[in-house]
Image (spheres, rainbow, N blue to C red):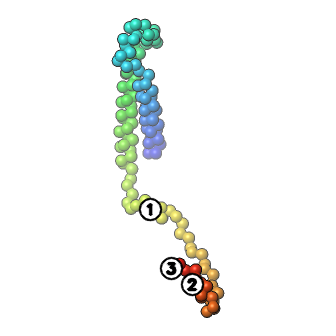
């Protein structure tokens, strides 16, 4: 299932980049008037109107691919198995439980030392 998700995601990203590129390459509606006065669009590979038809059809197909891959990714993501509990419970389970270090026995305090320890305690 992870392989399918990765493949659809790759197609989705490529379609998105291609749609962006094709939209930026296309001429606006006002560019036709410039072509009539010899701006060079009539001498293009597809002719004066051929490039607009080709680019718009290609953009439509890529937009449909983008739409289908979006729905597919949403469907795959919604059908993943749900886990119960919180994320923190999973994190606590995955960590190894360590034993506390042995605390060395402290020396017995003499009554004269107790005064110096009470000075360190903040009030």
Q: Is residue 62 visible?
A: yes
Q: CA distance from mark 2 to mark 1?
A: 40 Å
Q: Where residue 118 is drawn, which disc sits there?
A: 2
Q: Earlier in the sequence, mark 2 or mark 1?
A: 1
**Residue corresponding to mark 3:** 123
Q: Where residue 34 is drawn, which disc sits there?
A: none
Give 122 or 31, whichever is nearer the viewer.
122
Callouts 1 and 3 close, C-beta under 8 Å: no
Q: Residue at x 53, y 78 (%)?
A: 122
Give 88 or 113, whichever is nearer the viewer.
113
Q: Position of residue 67 (x, y in %)?
A: 36, 34
- Asked which secondary structure carries label 2, the reply is helix
**Residue corresponding to mark 1:** 88
Q: Earlier in the sequence, mark 1 or mark 3?
A: 1
Q: Residue at x 44, y 22 (%)?
A: 25
Q: Is residue 53 visible?
A: no
Q: Position of residue 106 (x, y in %)?
A: 63, 85
- Asked which secondary structure carries label 1, the reply is helix
Q: Is residue 111 left or right of residue 81?
A: right
């Amino acid at each position: 299932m992870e392989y399918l998700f990765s493949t659809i995601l790759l197609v989705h990203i490529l379609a998105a980049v291609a749609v962006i590129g094709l939209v930026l390459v296309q001429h606006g509606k006002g560019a036709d008037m410039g072509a009539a006065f010899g701006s060079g669009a009539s001498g293009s590979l597809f002719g004066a109107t051929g490039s607009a038809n080709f680019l718009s059809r290609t953009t439509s197909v890529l937009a449909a691919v983008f739409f289908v891959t979006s729905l597919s990714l949403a469907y795959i993501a919604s059908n993943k198995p749900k886990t119960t509990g919180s994320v923190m419970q999973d994190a606590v389970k995955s960590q190894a439980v360590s034993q506390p270090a042995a605390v060395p026995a402290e020396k017995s305090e003499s009554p004269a030392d107790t005064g110096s320890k009470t000075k360190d305690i903040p009030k």
